[in-house]
Amino acid sequence: MKKFLILISLLFPAAGFAVHELENRDLVNGQRHYEQQCASCHGVNLEGQPDWQLPGPDGVLPAPPHDVTGHTWHHDNQMLFDYTKYGGLAYFATLGLTDIKSGMEGFGHALTDDEIWDILAYIRSTWPSRVKQIQDSRNPPH
Ligand code: HEC
């Protein structure tokens, strides 16, 4: 686990990514992988689960929508990537938050980095252009 966290922290200092990770991606491939890996929780139409803002009795949140009604577009590309690859617990651990519950495991074992970027690009492709621009502006220049 320790090794894993060191690996994550090494990945964090936004090292040399291409200009826009979510541009010129394979959206068809992204949609296919989204349907196989994400839709069971986040919804076939990216609508999320009902009452997604209210934790269940076990303290775990339902899956939020990835469409424009959710908060996916509030986050920068790297956060979305890390959350998807390493899962909620590992992501929050990098922020020093360990007393937290997550309903989402990492997909690093099931998806390649390119497949994750394709999925995120597919999600982005469903947002109106105004929202795309806002989300773009959350990415540090690199
Ligand atoms: C087993 C159900 C489940 C599956 C499958 C799942 N997620 Fe999640 N996801 C969640 C839950 C629940 C949350 C809410 C936060 C938490 O509990 O970690 C979440 C949160 C997120 C977030 C952070 C919140 C946001 O909107 O930015 C991202 C990004 C995300 N998921 C992406 C994905 C992607 C991409 C896939 C497919 C590769 C996926 N998830 C598959 C349950 C799931």
Image (cartoon, helix red, strand yellow):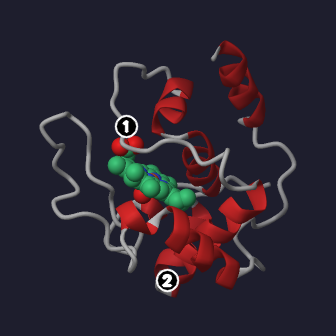
Position in image of residue 50 (x %, y %)? 18, 64
Q: Which mark is residue 102?
A: 1
Disc 1 residue lies near ligand 1 with CB under 8 A: yes
Where 97 sits versus 108, above or below? above
The Cα–Cα distance between marks 1 and 2, rounded to whole angstroms, is 25 Å
View extreme (left): residue: 57
23 sits left or right of 93 in the view: right
| Residue under the image location 37 percent in, 37 percent down | 102
Where 2 sits versus 86, above or below? above
| Residue under the image location 68 percent in, 52 percent down | 140
Foreground disc of the pair 1, 2: 1
| Residue under the image location 34 percent in, 26 percent down | 100
Mark 2 or mark 1, which is nearer the start of the sequence? 1
Camera-side residue of 13 and 118: 118
- Count residues near mark 2 (Cα–Cα under 10 Å), then give few for <14, some for 14-19, many for 20+: some
Camera-side residue of 29 and 15: 29
Q: Amino acid at mark 1?
A: Ser
96 sits left or right of 138 in the view: left
Position in image of residue 103 (x %, y %)? 36, 42
Indicate the secondary structure of the residue bearing disc 1: loop
45 sits left or right of 113 in the view: left
Where 73 sits versus 111, above or below? below
Q: Which mark is residue 137?
A: none
Camera-side residue of 122 and 14: 122
Q: Amino acid at mark 2?
A: Thr
Indicate the secondary structure of the residue bearing disc 2: loop
Disc 2 residue lies near ligand 1 with CB under 8 A: no
Position in image of residue 83 (x %, y %)? 54, 45
The C terminus lies in quadrant: bottom right
Q: Which mark is residue 126?
A: 2
Q: Quadrant of residue 82?
A: top right
Camera-side residue of 84 and 17: 84
